[in-house]
Image (cartoon, coloured by chain):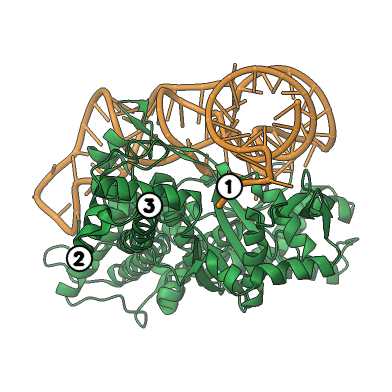
Chain colours: A green, B orange
RNA sequence: GCCCCCGUAGCUCAGUGGACAGAGCAGUCGCCUCCUAAGCGAAAGGUCGUAGGUUCGACUCCUACCGGGGGCACCA
């Protein structure tokens, strides 16, 4: 019995009470009842507070209401007991056979177990990382790579048609500094005062010189342009490669120039003008964002006739909508949170619904500690911690897991010494180990000629408390996935896997799965093997949603 | 001055109104002739930043304050 099925059973019981006239509700019977897993075992397998919630509407004492409901529910299929506790909680125990059926459901669904359709038919554009190609992806960007990619997986698993998008430009002040730094390196000069440092500058400069031996000797303008265009190309290739090795691939790399060349900026401004959202003042063209909650209006075209930064955002948003996306999700670091209100205002000015058609997820920063002291990162000094540094230190799995297991609302402090040395400190091993153990049992079973056979599966044999705990954990998985997708919080999947790993290890400790020595396999062995196979599936799927490998052996 | 995020066990963090607040790691004690000990069990560890408020019920919602972090351009 899954929580959803129990919810249905409770709704049916409510309806039956109302139909029989034993309870009068001022509102219609709810279509769904929230079912929770109590923290304390004595409170049963599942609990609901529905009687507390409906007590007033039924003009009844919540306990009395709960008593009626308990009596009605006790006769339902698969329910072993229903009792009232505290102020009116209804605690339910599920019959072993009904509980065991969860394992069958998992195996029948296979890799699709946990899938939901809350975003079916919806096209979502998910933009993240979007670092300009002036250097390797640094530690902050890595967080969005891990979380963003995982969120993409969750949204796809929830029925959405997801496009992962990376937005960049290759001109402007940042890129100029990059080009001047490359040229300085090629000429054997020190990096410019406002330039970039680090070995990668020298490496890329050397590659360009290898391609064009006279590159550094050309006139400044020509040389700069060459180092700019080739430098961007080489840098971007490196970024894509390191993201790929990190398990993150984008569907679209969107070049800002495209917006200007395609006339998207002009069209966006024309549209907003038509809607009466633009006005001229002090020789500049302004957007009335303050009408939609922004602190002040924003300049779109500067008085010198050049488009301001926001013009690109306007055009880009419009472009996404014109490409058919129902929803644009953008992940940004906390240092960009000031943009949120103007972006939302911009969305509203277009006549769209902020928070629905446009969503901006703000994540907090990653701090690095070494010897317990904060590490100062400087692009100029080249002391930036990159995606590759992180992967070299702890590997892709640990890095992705570590970055995805925390709420993006909280700042992460990463202790580099600890990660580089005692990587056991990372919970990813605890979770992966569970998968390896499960795989090992299934391998050994195959050697004994046993497999998880649903035809011979008797769910009622999974009677142990620890088996029930594990089954209930597996039954939670779809709810966890749906909630993580809905709230854009992949870390919920990681936390769930940690809890479930613990539940499995405890089960393993007291329930022997395979026959020992000359022992003949019994139906109990077979039933437990089905549970093991189902558990393995959930770990494989869950780790997959995080982009972390599920090892067969450790 | 205004805006956003955080403050929970020694450390890193879960917990978006429900019943005695949880995990991983670190530390104490115990458990490998048998499916992976990267595991399990036991003990220990907390004024959930502070003070009010809403509620039958608050770590969770509201207000104020304290502490930490990040932002507040006709820069990109």
Q: Which residue is mark 1?
A: A43
Q: Nearer the viewer, residue B13 or A101?
A: B13
Task: Report x, y in % for residue A165.
Answer: 50, 66
Kind of element beneath mark 3? helix
Q: Earlier in the sequence, mark 1 or mark 2?
A: 1
Instruction: Pick whichever, A527 or A408, lies toward us.
Output: A408
Quadrant occupied by the C terminus of chain A: bottom left
Left or right of A148? Residue A196 is left
Dot 3 surroundings within 10 Å: few (below 14), some, or many (20 or more)?
A: many
Q: Which residue is mark 2?
A: A515
CA–CA distance in space, label 1 to label 3 = 66 Å
Farthest residue to the front: give it: A219
Task: Look at the image and tell me in which quarter the N terminus of chain A lies.
Answer: bottom right
- In the picture, measured across the screen, residue A235 lies left or right of residue A411, that is left
Residue A419 in sight: yes
Of circles 3 and 2, which is in front?
3
Establish whether labels 3 and 2 are both on one chain. yes
Marks 1 and 3 share the same chain: yes
Residue A350 in the image: state x and y as whole percent: 77, 66
């Amino acid at each position: 019995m899954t929580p959803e099925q129990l919810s249905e059973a409770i709704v049916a019981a409510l309806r039956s009470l109302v139909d029989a006239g034993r309870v009068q509700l001022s509102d219609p019977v709810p279509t769904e009842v929230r079912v929770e897993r109590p923290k304390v075992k004595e409170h049963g397998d599942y609990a609901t507070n529905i009687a507390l919630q409906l007590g007033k509407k039924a003009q009844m004492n919540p306990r009395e209401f709960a008593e009626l409901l308990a009596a009605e529910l006790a006769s339902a299929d698969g329910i072993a007991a229903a009792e009232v506790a505290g102020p009116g909680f209804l605690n339910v125990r599920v019959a072993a056979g009904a509980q065991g059926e969860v394992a069958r459901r998992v195996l029948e669904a296979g890799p699709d177990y946990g899938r939901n359709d809350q975003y079916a038919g919806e096209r979502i554009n998910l933009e993240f990382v979007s670092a300009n190609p002036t250097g390797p992806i640094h530690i902050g960007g890595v967080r969005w790579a891990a979380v963003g990619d995982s969120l993409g997986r969750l949204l796809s698993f929830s029925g959405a048609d997801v496009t992962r998008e990376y937005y960049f430009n290759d001109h402007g002040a940042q890129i100029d500094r990059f080009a001047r730094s490359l040229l300085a390196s090629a000429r054997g000069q020190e990096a410019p005062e406002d330039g970039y440092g680090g070995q990668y500058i020298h490496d890329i400069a050397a590659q360009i010189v290898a391609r064009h031996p006279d590159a550094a000797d050309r006139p400044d303008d020509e040389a700069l342009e060459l180092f700019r265009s080739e430098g961007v190309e080489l840098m971007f290739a490196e970024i894509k490669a390191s993201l790929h090795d990190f398990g993150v691939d984008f569907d679209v790399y969107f070049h800002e120039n495209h917006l200007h060349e395609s006339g998207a900026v002009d069209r966006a401004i024309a549209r907003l003008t038509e809607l009466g959202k633009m006005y001229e003042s002090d020789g500049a063209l302004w957007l009335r964002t303050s009408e939609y909650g922004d602190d002040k209006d924003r300049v779109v075209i500067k008085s010198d006739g050049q488009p301001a930064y926001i013009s690109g955002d306007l055009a880009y948003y419009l472009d996404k909508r014109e490409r058919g996306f129902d929803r644009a999700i953008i992940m940004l670091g906390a240092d960009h949170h000031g943009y949120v209100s103007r972006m939302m205002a911009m969305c509203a000015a277009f006549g769209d619904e902020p928070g629905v058609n446009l969503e901006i997820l703000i994540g907090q920063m990653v701090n690095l500690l070494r010897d317990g002291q904060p590490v100062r990162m400087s692009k100029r000094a080249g002391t930036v911690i990159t995606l590759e540094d992180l992967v070299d230190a702890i590997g892709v799995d640990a890095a992705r897991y570590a970055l995805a297991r925390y709420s993006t609302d909280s700042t992460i402090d990463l202790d580099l010494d600890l990660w580089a040395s005692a990587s056991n400190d990372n919970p990813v091993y605890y979770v992966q180990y569970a998968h390896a153990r499960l795989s090992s049992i299934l391998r050994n079973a195959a050697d004994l000629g046993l497999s998880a056979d649903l035809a011979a599966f008797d769910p009622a044999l999974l009677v142990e408390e620890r088996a029930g705990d594990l089954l209930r954990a597996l039954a939670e998985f779809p709810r966890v996935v749906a909630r993580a997708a809905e709230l854009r919080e992949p870390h919920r999947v990681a936390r769930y896997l940690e809890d479930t790993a613990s539940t499995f290890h405890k089960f393993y400790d007291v329930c022997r799965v395979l026959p020992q020595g000359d022992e003949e396999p019994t139906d109990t062995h077979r039933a437990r093997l089905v549970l093991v196979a189902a558990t393995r599936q959930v770990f494989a799927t869950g780790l997959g949603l995080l982009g972390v490998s599920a090892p067969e052996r450790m």
